[in-house]
Image (cartoon, rainbow, N blue to C red):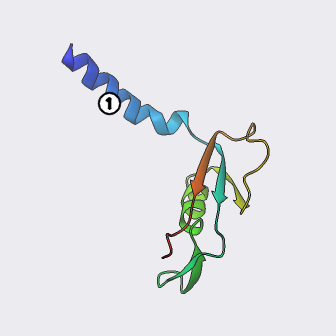
Amino acid sequence: MRTKRVLFALALCLAGPALLQAANVCVWNYDPLDRFYDAAVGESVDCAYHVEKTLTELGHTVTVSESTLPASLDGFDAVFCLMGWYRC
């Protein structure tokens, strides 16, 4: 029984990326003014920069929504909510 579970989990790990390929993703960047310097890029970037870049490189369609969440999320397969950095 345990072997079947392990094989099933392995099959999900291998099939997961193929099943989720080319998703339409919304990235909600709640605080677009919250920026930090990224030495690898050579400029200041916001919280959504690397998330958007990675999802695009993986073949997903990415829509970045600044400050307000879209009224309808029906067209999206996934939503990433980036809440910014905690400031004292």
The residue under label 1 is which amino acid type?
Answer: Leu
Question: Residue lying farthest right?
Answer: 71
Question: In the displayed structure, would residue 71 be above or below residue 63?
Answer: above
What is the number of callouts on the image? 1
Judge from the rendering whether residue 87 lies leftward or rightward of residue 3; answer left or right: right
Q: Position of residue 6 (x, y in %)?
A: 25, 25
Q: Nearer the viewer, residue 27 or 14?
A: 27
Which residue is under mark 1?
10
Q: Nearer the viewer, residue 55 or 76?
A: 76
Judge from the rendering whether residue 40 lies leftward or rightward of residue 59; answer left or right: left
Name the residue at 55% across, 61% down: 51
Question: In which quadrant will I find the N terminus?
Answer: top left
Q: Position of residue 48 (x, y in %)?
A: 59, 65
Q: Position of residue 75 (x, y in %)?
A: 75, 39
Q: Position of residue 76 (x, y in %)?
A: 70, 41
On the image, which quarter does residue 27 sit in?
bottom right
Q: Nearer the viewer, residue 31 or 76?
A: 31
Name the residue at 49% across, 69% down: 86
Secondary structure of the residue carrying tag 1 is: helix
Question: Residue lying farthest front?
Answer: 88
On the image, which quarter does residue 11 sit in?
top left
Question: In the displayed structure, would residue 28 be above or below residue 25?
Answer: below
Question: Residue lying farthest left?
Answer: 2
Name the residue at 54% across, 66% down: 50
